[in-house]
Image (cartoon, rainbow, N blue to C red):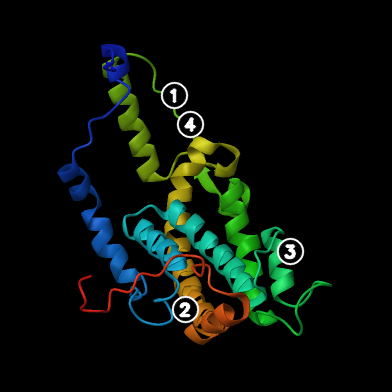
Amino acid sequence: MEVCTVSDVEEESFLDIQSDELLREIQDDVEDNLLHLPLFYNPEVEPFLNNGNLFYLYAESYRCIVYGQYHAGILLMGQLMEFTVFEIIRVHTGKQYKGNYASALSFAAGKSDDSPQPHIIHPEIVDKIVTQKNTIRNPYTHGDIKKILKGRTAAAVMYKIGNGPDRILKSLERAVNSFKSGTAPYSELNPANNPSIAYVFKRDVDKKRCFKQAWELYPLFDLLLDQYLNRKIQEEFVKKYGSPYAHLPVIDVTSDDEK
């Protein structure tokens, strides 16, 4: 058996993350974020009980937000809407929709030439999903930082601090004093023009947007399951199109006969 080794130089590229340290780091985020999120849905009750594939994605997005992974939470909430729309189309038509997300929404709203009429999902609900897709889901999916920050700017100034420890300390002290006194000649900065700077602003934007999206999309997810993927609709799907498990052998374990 070959054993992989890491050189001293390579070792400097990695951090040994300790679980207890990590948990301490995120504990404050967890407690605060739970206070700002809608209550977590119970997977053992309708309409979530028979939609475990979608509930898994919902739960993963929720946990990302709880743990302070706001960008990931936003991405997963967008995927949750997308996967839910495709699943609704599948259950109502008996086949997997082959088009992209945008065309699937038009199809579900009854706006395509081959759409079931009058619609699968009410057009007003589809309009809300389309708005989320265009304004949030797409910019985050494609990394469009300008659309994510939406023109946010900041006042900025550059300081020349020189070389050497003593000079740097004195320069930093002067910089702090000019900042506090308001005498520094600030100029407007667009953080979207520099990804490394944009990140500092983006995390705050992501956090606020994440909670807003959660309060809008999670109830919408509940509504979509309740109206279009409830138990009755799924039972009708099986009657009409057959069960995907129909080909599996059935073993009767209800009998007390041990033969």
Q: Secondary structure at mark 2?
A: helix
Label 1 or label 3, whichever lies nearer to me, is 3
Label 4 or label 2, whichever lies nearer to me, is 2
Mark 1 and mark 3: Cα distance apart in space: 54 Å
Residue at 18 percent across and 49 percent down: it is 24
Residue at 63 percent across and 77 percent down: it is 92
Q: Is 32 or 168 nearer to us in this picture?
A: 32
Q: Which mark is residue 222?
A: 2
Q: Secondary structure at mark 3?
A: helix
Q: Residues within 10 Å of mark 3 (few under 14, many from 20)?
A: some
Q: Secondary structure at mark 1?
A: loop
Q: Residue furthest right?
A: 113
Residue named by callout 1: 160
Mark 1 and mark 2: Cα distance apart in space: 55 Å
Mark 4 and mark 2: Cα distance apart in space: 50 Å
Mark 4 and mark 1: Cα distance apart in space: 7 Å
Task: Where is residue 72? Give x, y as percent.
Answer: 45, 52
Q: Are marks 1 and 3 in contact (CB under 8 Å)?
A: no
Q: Which mark is residue 158?
A: 4
Residue at 23 percent across and 70 percent down: it is 259
Q: Amino acid at mark 1?
A: Lys
Mark 3 and mark 4: Cα distance apart in space: 48 Å
Labels 3 and 4: the sequence-earlier one? 3
Locate residue 212 relative to residue 82 in the image: left or right: left
Q: Which mark is residue 103?
A: 3
